[in-house]
Image (cartoon, rainbow, N blue to C red):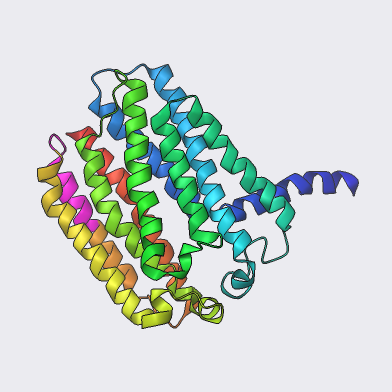
Amino acid sequence: MAATEAVASPARAASVLWRFSRPHTVIGTAVSVAGLFAISVDALPSVDAGRAAFHLFWTLVAGLAVNVYIVGINQITDVEIDRVNKPGLPIAAGDLSLERAWWIVAAAGVLPVVLALTQGGLEVVAVVAALAVGTAYSVPPARLKRFAIVASLCVSGVRSAIVNLGVAAHFTSALGDGSPTIPAGVWALTAFVLPFSLAIAVLKDVPDAEGDRAHRIATFTVRHGGRAVLHAGLAVLTLAYLGMATLGPLLVGGADPVLLAVGHLAALAALWAAARSANPSDRAAFTRFYMRVWLLFFLEYAIVPAACLAG
């Protein structure tokens, strides 16, 4: 029995940590870094493979640590809300104590700062900015998540500007001549991810209306209703996809224009197919739709790098 428990304990701890990290956000961060790496390397005249692998690995570690910090601090400060909205999360479910959660969050906050200090001022600014926004979003007295517009801008700002521009600047600086540059493909990704992450930020609150309303978190869903938010999110995503399909080939010189246009139109078709089952009054059904939107977010970091590499 003791041996069985010894084996089960690390596996259970890993499972709790995985749930605590919010897997869809972890995957989103990983594919973002990988996609930005591909675009950055393609834009450089030559890259040492060993040096590239080194920077890719540690950038992934830093990015994932920032991700865990941000989602972790949110769960620590939202325990009562999560017991209504997301009872399966480890703190709300009683599988992780607040003390241990704080230790995880502290380690996840310190690690990327230490790594950034070895890379220079630009990386320190990007990491500290992401951590600061994540803290202000969840922690009193700021607790910016209480304000719908500001909360949405926090999410989109980190996902679009800080991640895309900061990571690309790091890769081009570290693997190139030391001067940070932003390839055209990254600018296009940033322009697309800004509205996309705004849509994610408002859609994520639709299944959480009950707990948010009870704790006076004035999300767009609480103020305007789930159906209005669904329609608004779909409108923003549709405009973003049409914009990339039509303007992307003009903005990203050297990329394969057919792949850019067809890839985004196909993703738009997949979005509307998924939206057919999105019922704001059915929490489970809407959550499935929301996770499909995240799958399309992952796909974006394959479409643009593939178009750049193909061109």
**239 and 145: which is toward the camera:** 145
Q: Main secondary structure of the magenta part?
A: helix
Q: Measured from the top left, where is residue 257 in percent x and y?
A: 13, 43
Q: Is residue 230 left or right of residue 81?
A: left
* Residue 225 shows up from this direction: no
Q: Residue at x 38, y 32 (%)?
A: 122
Q: Quadrant of residue 30?
A: top left
Does the magenta-highlighted stretch encompass residue 259?
yes
Judged from this view, the residue extending furthest toward the front is 141
- The answer, for residue 201, to whether it is visible in the render is yes
Q: Vertical placement of 213 versus 27: above or below?
A: below
Nearest the camera: 40 or 9?
A: 40
* Relative horizontal placement of residue 254, taking residue 103 as reference (left or right): left
- Give the x, y percent position of residue 25: 47, 53
Q: Position of residue 186 (x, y in %)?
A: 26, 40
The residue nearer to you, when weighing 122 against 62, is: 122
Number of marks drawn: 0
Toward the right, the furthest residue is: 1
Residue pictured at 42% horizontal, 33% vertical: 123
The x and y percentages for residue 225 are: 38, 82
Q: In the drawing, does residue 74 fall left or right of residue 181?
A: right
Up the image or down, 54 lies above or below 207; here it is above
Q: Residue at x 36, y 52 (%)?
A: 157
Quadrant of image for the C terminus: top left
Q: Does 308 appear in magenta?
A: no
At x 30%, y 20%, the residue is 176
Per the rendered image, the range of residues in magenta is 253-266
Q: In which quarter of the view is residue 264 placed?
A: bottom left
Along the viewing direction, whichever of 287 and 54 lies nearer the viewer = 54
